[in-house]
Amino acid sequence: MSEEVVLLDFWPSPFGMRMRIALAEKGIKYESKEEDLRNKSDLLLQMNPIHQKIPVLIHNGKPVCESLIQVQYIDEVWHHKSPLLPSDPYQRAIARFWADFADKKMSDLGRKIWATKGEEQANAKKEFIESLKLLEGELGDKPYFGGENLGYVDVVFVPFYSWFYAYEMCGDFSIDAECPKLMAWAKRCLEKESVSESLPDQEKVYGFVLQMKKAFGIE
Amino acid sequence: MSEEVKVFGTLGSPMSCRVELALKLKGVQYEYIEEDVHKNKSPLLLKYNPVHKKIPVLLHNGKPIAESLVILEYIEETWKGNPILPEDPYEKAMARFWARFLDEKCLPALWNAAWSPENEREKAVEEACDCLKTLESTLKGKRFFGGDTVGLVDIAAIFIGFWLRVLQEATGQELLSAEKFPDLVKWTDEFVSCSVVKESLPPRERLWAFFKARVAGAMDAQTNASK
């Protein structure tokens, strides 16, 4: 049966990047449609009426929304290649826990770092580094969160690396100085084509963040 | 093999209720340990959930799992009887979508609608009603969100099934009405009348008293603020 896979995406979105990596890891051919979020397409509004957000995965005409759910979905459908979640239920629970943790902390705190100032920003930076250190602890001595290969947590978390430079510039701090092991992990991930082809250049992301700050009137 | 299953929870918490309900549905024997999360978290809780320090925590043969939706998926994958998720990957993705919708949009909106300050109340109520409207249309007259049997989404929606009614009585604010949301109200009746669900719920009077006390506290705070 021929599979039709479409991804509604937006280049700087870490959530979109997760799907790019996962689809590449699985060797799935797909059509990528870039959305202009100030002018959402009818297709996006039809396929994700509840949240009206990207990414949206459309598989044989049926939409799957929310990137964590999408990654698990393609892991289950294309289960014969490059499994992202382990097979043991307990290890799967650990992976889901940390993916959820990385997802919530990075999204929320990252936004506060580029979009706020003063005490709010300082608190966000502190908690951001604490969260990264916890993730570093979970990584331990493994090359990837998934063990010997990229796994679910790696796919969920590594896209935020493309935003680290923007966070550092906006927050005036060094992530590398605080979390060298994590930076080594990110660079290791980038040696994989599925990751390097999916993450935009950090400077480009910073440029985008500056545009957003201007648009929202944030200094 | 003997299984050792423990649940660290708090009476009155819908999240800890989710875990107990799933275990009961699957016929899994477990030991329940009550945690005083407001005043005195036990050393065991802090050991088993060092990251969030919250309940519920499931302990299976000494191995801890935290976060209620993560725990529900673990329970589903470990004990195969009475499945709470469909087999089909697409249907599974949809169930996960609605469970997340409940946690990230719906439940916070319902909570805000009850407790937000006067000047934010109208907007909060509107958001809450939008969420209920979405859930109503998802139910589409089915007996349960899971179809003919209780599933992940029904379990995740336990707050709406039980807590919301009690909250509405305590605050006098009616969001979930039979006129506006007939299918959803019918679902709450069906769901709560299941024996396994009834067994998992906290005592109604205690929950009502808790909410009433909170309403009184909120009114005092408002009176003091306007003095």
Image: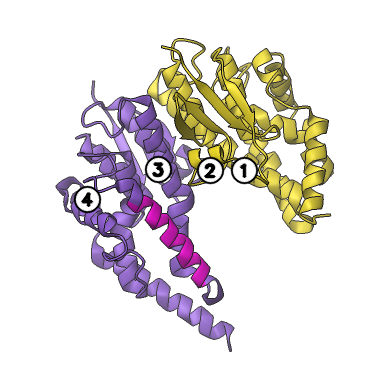
Chain colours: A yellow, B purple
- According to the picture, the residue beneath numbered tag 3 turns out to be B99
Front in this rendered view, residue A210 or B111: A210
Q: Are marks 1 and 2 in contact (CB under 8 Å)?
A: yes
**Residue nearer the viewer, A17 or A34:** A34
**Dot 4 crowding, Cα within 10 Å, few <14, some 14–19, many 20+:** many
Asked if labels 4 and 3 touch by Cβ distance under 8 angstroms, the answer is no
Q: Which residues are magenta?
A: B121-136
Q: Are marks 3 and 1 on the same chain?
A: no
Are the residues flagged by discs 3 and 2 in contact, CB closer than 8 Å?
Answer: no
N-terminal of the pair, mark 3 or mark 4, is 3
Mark nearer the N terminus (1 vs 2) = 1
- Amino acid marked by disc 4: Phe
Query: Magenta stretch mostly in which secondary structure?
Result: helix
Q: Residues within 10 Å of mark 1 (few under 14, many from 20)?
A: few
SS at circle 2: helix
Residue at the disc numbered 4 = B191
Position of B105 compared to A207: left or right? left
The Cα–Cα distance between marks 3 and 4, rounded to whole angstroms, is: 16 Å
Identity of the amino acid at label 1? Lys
Which residue is more in the foreground, B156 or A207?
A: A207
